[in-house]
Amino acid sequence: MLLFQDFHPLVAIATTPTAAQTLQPLCHTARLMLWLPESVHTPERKDVPTESFYQGSLKSHIASLWQNHRAFIFCLATGAVVRLIAPLLKDKSSDPAVIVVDETGQFVISLCSGHQGKADQLARMIALQLGATPVLTGGSTGLNLPAIDMVGIPFGWQRGEGDWTGVSAAVAKGERVEVIQEVGSTLWQQHLPPGHPFVFDGGDKAVDSNSANARIWISFTQRRFSPDSDLPKIQWHPRVLWVGIGCERGTSRELIETAIIQTCQRYHLAVDAIAGIATIDIKASEVGLVEFCQARDLPLRTFPAEVLRSVNVPTPSTVVNQEVGTPSVAEAAALVCSERFSASGTKVPTTNLLVQKQIVRGDNQPGAVTVAIAVAQREYTGRIGQLFLVGTGPGQLDQITPAAKTALSQADAVIGYSLYIDLITPILHPGQIIERLPITQERQRAQRAIELAQWGLTVAVVSSGDCGIYGMAGLVLEELKAQGWDGKMPGVQVFPGITALQAAASRVGAPLMHDFCAISLSNLLTPWDVIEKRLNAAAQADFVIALYNPRSRTRIEQLAIAHSILLQHRSPQTPVAIVRSAYREDEEITLSTLDKLLDIPIDMLTTVLIGNQSTRLHGDWMITPRGYLVNDE
């Protein structure tokens, strides 16, 4: 289960059997441990495993779990939770998310670490699972704005120095906030609501302090803010710097770290903007390099000499060429990595090399380190992307499964046809990337979703009905396969939905009680002669038939042909149901017979159900018997 994985390890705590029952649905969906006091443990109680019961005081038990869990879900009084966790709270950047659910499961409160601990996001997800109301009290929530200390998280940005509280307060007040973004994705800018307080600038253009109430720098540069300034300022550091390293065998981690930090300081570069380390493949197991990357949680990218040899660098070395078969290691490796993270996919020029090779030796340490730094056009997210293929059912929010709702809430980006996006808007939240593409651009939707997921985002691709039935799931998987997907990265999860034929059938009774089939009359992806063969076969076999995509503005003759084929094998009095926009505000339902089918308005939002020889109309209901051995009137 990919849902809730960002919050693991996750723990839930209840003190009464009723509270435990309220949280029980989360145990299976979120794979969390539910803890109860030993006092409520009875032999007949089998809904919670034995190891979920704690002994002693709840306060001591929570203290024993606090450091090793990213999120806590409490089902008890809010005041009690406040008193229990108060001694354990240290800083919002490190405290776990804390959620409170009332015993009846009507409200889910984001109590602590709403932004950086993602408690707000977790509260939304839990509320969707329980059918409850999320209670979010952050200053930006009411303004439909993303929290300023969260906007860069999907893209792997690192929070730098600054007055985060002051800038967040300015945003919450709707005051003018200057944004100077030099690098990194601007997707967050493109999905802000109208009337937002941000004013965007570019480059190193000076900003009049009197014209702004706060300022945000998004850069790989490490800035030092004046303590004498009253203007609150913060820094986000997109991870765009690739550090090329060459080193003598046996060079220590300490010397490598010192060399990188000194080089960054000398050129005013933020260490937090480092995307990763690059070097030649013969250094892949160099202990100092490996230890440094593990300690800093940085990727180590290595390349063979022939790849590095093909890169044009400003300071090649014949000595290095004689030693390892390439005139450059540090500069060439840094440039190769920056090229691979180029948004345009074109070869990156040597001007992207911010720092030419610097050789650093330790005073009392053996070895030497060569450092070079290049900047990529696109940041490294450091995340494994996910694709959520979501079926949203017929349209009403209460017809969407809790798992599908949770997936939509968790996604960094949501992609779909504009009508389907509009129908699920209440589930979406500030900060999400919402991309609407026209109805004819299904393959472009799939390609865009894969692009974002391969970059590291969690992307929900929306289909009405069930995404695996005439939906986007097949197109996305086909495209992944065409691109050489290994079946693992990005991860894929399919969330089924109520299909159009199920929704239509439920509005008219029980027309699908015997064998049935679905046939799409759209010949955009299927040759029409194949569709005709299927219509003939289904009609002859006496299937109840659901027709998808029956008629569009330009494609009108297909329904007439299908009608003619069906009349060759079915009685003109065969019951039919024409259901348009099932469960939506503009729903239209017509019950008729096969001979009158073409007299009824039908379009792409319509599903047509055609009965078999046993199907009958009874008042406003369409009924197909479960078998043929039924006495007919």
Image (cartoon, rainbow, N blue to C red):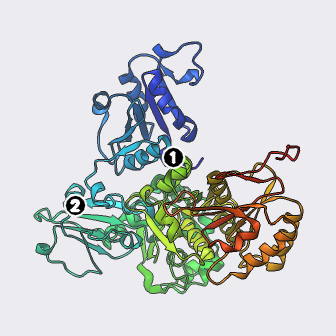
Q: Which mark is residue 4?
A: 1
Q: Which mark is residue 560?
A: none
Q: Is residue 489 left or right of residue 531?
A: left
Q: Which residue is mark 2?
A: 167
Q: Decide: few, some or many residues near mark 1? Use Cα within 10 Å; few <14, some 14-19, many ≥20.
A: many
- Residue 329 is at least partly visible in this image: no
Residue 193 in picture, x, y percent from top left: 33, 68
Q: Nearer the viewer, residue 366 or 507?
A: 507
Q: Secondary structure at mark 1?
A: loop
Quarter of the image where one finds residue 353:
bottom left
Distance Cα–Cα, label 1 vs label 2: 29 Å
Q: Nearer the viewer, residue 71 or 620?
A: 620
Q: Which label lies toward us, 1 or 2?
A: 1
Question: Looking at the image, is 558 positioned above or below residue 141?
Answer: below
Q: Nearer the viewer, residue 405 or 520?
A: 520
Farthest residue to the front: give it.
Answer: 633
- Residue 372 is at least partly visible in this image: yes
Residue 326 in picture, x, y percent from top left: 60, 80
Amino acid beneath label 1: Phe
Residue 322 in picture, x, y percent from top left: 61, 79
Amino acid beneath label 2: Val
Quarter of the image where one finds residue 351:
bottom left
Query: Contact, CB < 8 Å: mark 1 with mark 2?
Result: no
Q: Which residue appears at 46% of the width and 24% of the height?
A: 18
Q: Which residue appears at 31% of the width and 68% of the height?
A: 265
Q: Which residue appears at 28% of the width and 70% of the height?
A: 217
Labels 1 and 2: the sequence-earlier one:
1
Q: Secondary structure at mark 2?
A: helix
Q: Nearer the viewer, residue 371 or 24?
A: 24
Q: Decide: few, some or many residues near mark 2? Use Cα within 10 Å; few <14, some 14-19, many ≥20.
A: many
Residue 295 in picture, x, y percent from top left: 47, 52
